[in-house]
Amino acid sequence: MNATLDTVPTGLAGKVVIPDDRRYRLLRSTYTTVGRPAAVVLPESAGDVAAALRFARETGLRVAVRSGGHGLSGSGTNEGGLVIDLSALHRVDVLDRGSRLVRVEAGARWAQVAEALAPHGLAISSGDHGNVGVGGIATGGGVGWLVRQYGLTVDHIRAVEVVLPDGTFVRADAEAEPDLLWVMRGAGAGAGIAVAFEIEAMELGDIGYAQLVAAVDPAGETLRRWADVMARAPRELSTAVMLSSQGISTAAFITAVVSSDSPSVIRDALEPLLGIGDVTVRQAHVGPYTELVASLHLHANAGQMPSSTTNGLLTGMTPDAARALVTASAAPDPVLIQLRSLGGATHDPAPSAMAFAHRHQNTLVVASAFPPDDRATLAAAWTPLARHTDGAYVNFESAPDEATFARAYPGPTGTRVTDLWKRYDPDRVLRPQPPA
Ligand SMILES: Cc1cc2nc3c(=O)[nH]c(=O)nc-3n(C[C@H](O)[C@H](O)[C@H](O)COP(=O)(O)OP(=O)(O)OC[C@H]3O[C@@H](n4cnc5c(N)ncnc54)[C@H](O)[C@@H]3O)c2cc1C
């Protein structure tokens, strides 16, 4: 055993995985990043998380926090440090069906949450992938399939159980520890380790679901018409668009989700999308939410998806922005461009209500590039796009730095986030992105 690891606290016996343990292979890495931590701790309680933090302090090991391991920057692993992997904390409990209050532990995957809530006729809009962890989404934002109906995941968090970097356990709600609740809803990674969230779920039966393909012209008029439709769409409709280019021809693959099982509501919501251009309907059906955030997505993370990702928010889809999006997608070294509709319920909270402050933008643009030249390719493609954006979402950023912090947490939000990170984590144990 590594000399620094000789003194594993008794409470953590059997929960510390080191490189010669056969479990290490499946625990060392995240989705995007192969890691070589000195040890991975698998806490089963808030007390274990506090013990792991104490252990890290005593051994001098750098801490990485992991819930689902889907973070794009790979911050859920490290080289030679201690990973606190919350995957054993995955309970999902309906606390009060009447008020739809649900307690979700941070290490659950969103597919597990969807499965557990479906029999109660409830759902939490989280993200588009079932293997993503509760902890990363619920401390950052949560732009899900039902985002325009429900808002962001963080919008519905009523309380968070947190282990602070000094090992103190706090349950933060609006009455007790409102500052901690504020920062955990959008900038939680730098304040503490969330072990569980109390979240108000939504009533949800079956949903309408369609996949459409639209030809996209080089000027991006199709994208402008999509944005126009979304600006007028009922909240029940949320869409995600993936741009795919072959040579000079670009197509938009649109996933449209309607949070209703009523055929007429679904039809009325989807119909305007058929008018954005030359549109083919690949499939349309009514089914459970668990088909979208599916258990089939669950998998181990072994660094299988190295990539570089950045993002920005658009308020309006101007002609210049639309053209720049198509150009980026069709470049000789193309990047994968995804557009996610915002608006609707995402505009309901005041910008100052929580650390996720972006409440007027209508589209999230995510750009990703893949090895071998992912960083350079992304930088080249993103530069012309960046000037059209107004803010960013912290969770779709693979190389967080001061500039991305300022875009994710603009103005007074950034000042308050920085102050609270300093208050809760003065020694920078969680070492989040800048500022220092
Ligand atoms: C395939 C894929 C699809 C995605 N789709 C969406 C989507 O549709 N919508 C969307 O909003 N986002 C999406 N994301 C981005 C996602 O929100 C972030 O990657 C998120 O951080 C992943 O959460 P995780 O728990 O799996 O991450 P992890 O890798 O486990 O954690 C990443 C970082 O988040 C922080 N963190 C995690 N858990 C905690 C905790 N319990 N307490 C405090 N800090 C914590 C830590 O800094 C940690 O290092 C997607 C990512 C991928 C890879």
Image: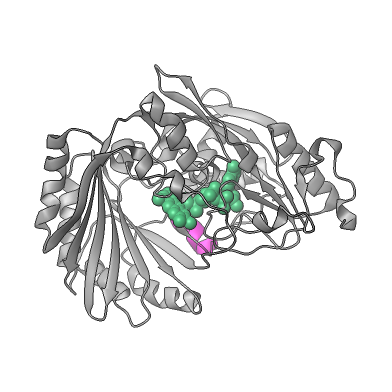
Farthest residue toward the left?
A: 275
Q: Looking at the image, which residue is at 30% across and 41% down?
A: 347
* Residue 118 seen from this side: yes
Quadrant where the N terminus sits is: bottom right
In this picture, residue 237 sits left or right of residue 95 = left
Q: Is residue 174 magenta?
A: no
Any part of residue 419 in sight: no
Range of magenta residues:
398-410
Which residue corresponds to the image point at 31% horizontal and 65% vertical from the top-left? 388
Residue 393, given in percent of the width and then of the height, sits at 43, 53
- Name the one closer to the observer, 74 or 414: 74
Asked if residue 152 lies left or right of residue 322, the reply is right
Q: Which one is in front, 382 or 415?
A: 382
On the image, the x and y values in percent for residue 343 come to: 27, 45
Residue 128 placement (x, y as % from top left): 39, 49
Q: Is residue 16 left or right of residue 413?
A: right
Taking depth in this image into account, of 136 and 86 the one nearest to the observer is 86
Q: To which quarter of the image does residue 401 belong?
A: bottom right
In front here: 307 or 290? 290
- Which residue is found at the position 63% from the left and 59% from the top? 29
Question: Which quarter shows the C terminus?
Answer: bottom right
Report the side of 36 relative to 434 (left or right): right
User: Relative to 251, is 97 above or below?
Assistant: above
Above or below, 403 relative to 177: below
